Image (tube, rainbow, N blue to C red):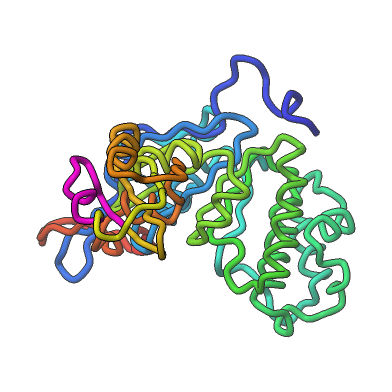
């Protein structure tokens, strides 16, 4: 099914979050896992949610799936509440844990879950698309973590969903299994599905997603293409051949964020790359090159230090909401 047949013109977006917050209480402290997130995802988009531990990615996805309710704000999936979209088979998820019966075989697991849907996709078809046909007779308890993730992917395909939500989908996979998984996901995206995935892997976000939503401390700190996020976070990098004794004069130039030297070549990060380039030329620099900073640099610049912990304030009266503790 292509993208045009999955969505009608003028239909609501696949996902809309408006000023969404989620808080809970842990050890008499108020933990603000998500703080005023605004996000809209259109039909057929492939979006990576990127951020350090504690950024709020998993809690946000839990609300999209209706597994927990926002403390305030609104979440709509295809114009309705998340649970209604899930119950209608329009949304499926591949989560990090849960839901597998260890004593069943892989094929038995898919057959059992398929029996719960009114019109599931053929069992053999979803197993082939998830790359687990060769594991059909293996017991789930004998499957590796990566193989179990591919089994969860097959289960997610059974209702033929319009939206796939993936939370760290390649956790536990080796490099080869990760490559095969993303090849399968590319095929699903080509059919017009909307895909949202949370990941710690910068390379996955860079190579697979059309758009990156970068979260830190429960808020969205950047939202755009990889190139746009790089430019916003790091400015541009100017490289040139320059005599080492001129480094101090170059560092004194306005707007220089960092300077690295490798032999005769200097690599400088600055907000105003044009002014920096002129300074380098004035100092006698040669072989000038201007590039956008790496996604790694953007990630560090935008998330900052100490972003691994959610924002906390003392609050002894807030009701303890254990469902939010997966931030």
Can residue 42 be spotted in the picture? Answer: yes
Q: Is residue 226 magenta?
A: no
Residue 281 shown left or right of residue 112 in the figure = left
Note whether 163 is above or below 304 in the view shown.
above
- Which of the 4 image quarters holds residue 262? bottom left
Quarter of the figure with the N terminus: top right
- Which of the 4 image quarters holds residue 84? top right
Q: Position of residue 123 (x, y in %)?
A: 86, 57
Q: Position of residue 235 (x, y in %)?
A: 35, 40
Q: Nearer the viewer, residue 20 or 255?
A: 255
Magenta stretch in the rendered image:
247-259
Taking the view exactly as shown, the residue that stands out farthest to the top is 10
Total number of numbered discs in the rendering: 0
Note whether 30 is above or below 238 in the view shown.
below
Note whether 304 is above or below 237 in the view shown.
below
Q: Nearer the viewer, residue 45 or 179?
A: 179
Q: Nearer the viewer, residue 28 or 147?
A: 147
Q: Residue at x 37, y 49 (%)?
A: 215
Can residue 213 be spotted in the picture? Answer: no
Q: Position of residue 244 (x, y in %)?
A: 30, 60
- Which of the 4 image quarters holds residue 279? top left
Q: Residue at x 43, y 47 (%)?
A: 63
Note whether 127 is above or below 48 in the view shown.
below
Taking the view exactly as shown, the residue that stands out farthest to the bottom is 142
Q: Residue at x 73, y 23 (%)?
A: 4
Q: Position of residue 64 (x, y in %)?
A: 48, 44
Quarter of the figure with the C terminus: bottom left
Q: Nearer the viewer, residue 176 or 285?
A: 285
């Amino acid at each position: 099914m292509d993208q045009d047949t999955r969505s009608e013109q003028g239909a609501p977006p696949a996902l809309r979050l408006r000023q969404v917050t989620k808080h809970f209480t842990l050890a008499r402290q108020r933990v603000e896992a998500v703080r005023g997130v605004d996000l809209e995802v259109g039909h057929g988009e492939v979006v990576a949610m990127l951020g350090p531990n504690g950024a709020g990615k998993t809690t946000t996805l839990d609300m999209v799936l209706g597994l927990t309710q926002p403390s305030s704000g609104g979440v709509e999936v295809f114009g309705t509440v998340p649970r209604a979209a899930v119950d209608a088979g329009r949304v499926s998820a591949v989560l990090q844990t849960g839901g597998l019966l260890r004593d069943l075989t892989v094929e038995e697991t898919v057959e059992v879950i398929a029996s719960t849907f009114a019109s599931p996709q053929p069992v053999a078809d979803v197993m082939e698309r998830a790359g687990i046909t060769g594991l059909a007779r293996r017991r789930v308890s004998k499957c590796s973590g990566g193989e179990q993730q591919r089994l969860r992917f097959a289960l997610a395909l059974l209702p033929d969903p319009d939206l796939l939500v993936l939370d760290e989908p390649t956790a536990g996979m080796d490099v080869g299994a990760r490559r095969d998984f993303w090849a399968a996901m590319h095929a699903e995206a080509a059919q017009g599905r909307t895909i949202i995935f949370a990941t710690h892997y910068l390379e996955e976000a860079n190579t697979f997603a059309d758009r990156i939503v970068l979260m830190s401390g429960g808020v969205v700190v950047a939202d755009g293409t990889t190139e746009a996020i790089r430019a916003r976070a790091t400015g541009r990098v100017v490289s040139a051949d320059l005599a080492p004794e001129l480094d101090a004069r170059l560092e004194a130039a306005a707007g220089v964020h960092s300077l690295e030297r490798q032999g005769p070549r200097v690599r400088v990060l600055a907000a105003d790359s044009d002014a920096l380039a002129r300074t380098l030329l004035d100092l006698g620099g040669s072989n000038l090159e201007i590039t956008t900073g790496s996604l790694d640099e953007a990630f560090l610049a935008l998330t900052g230090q100490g972003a691994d912990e959610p924002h906390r304030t003392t609050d002894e009266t807030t009701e303890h909401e254990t469902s939010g503790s997966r931030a």
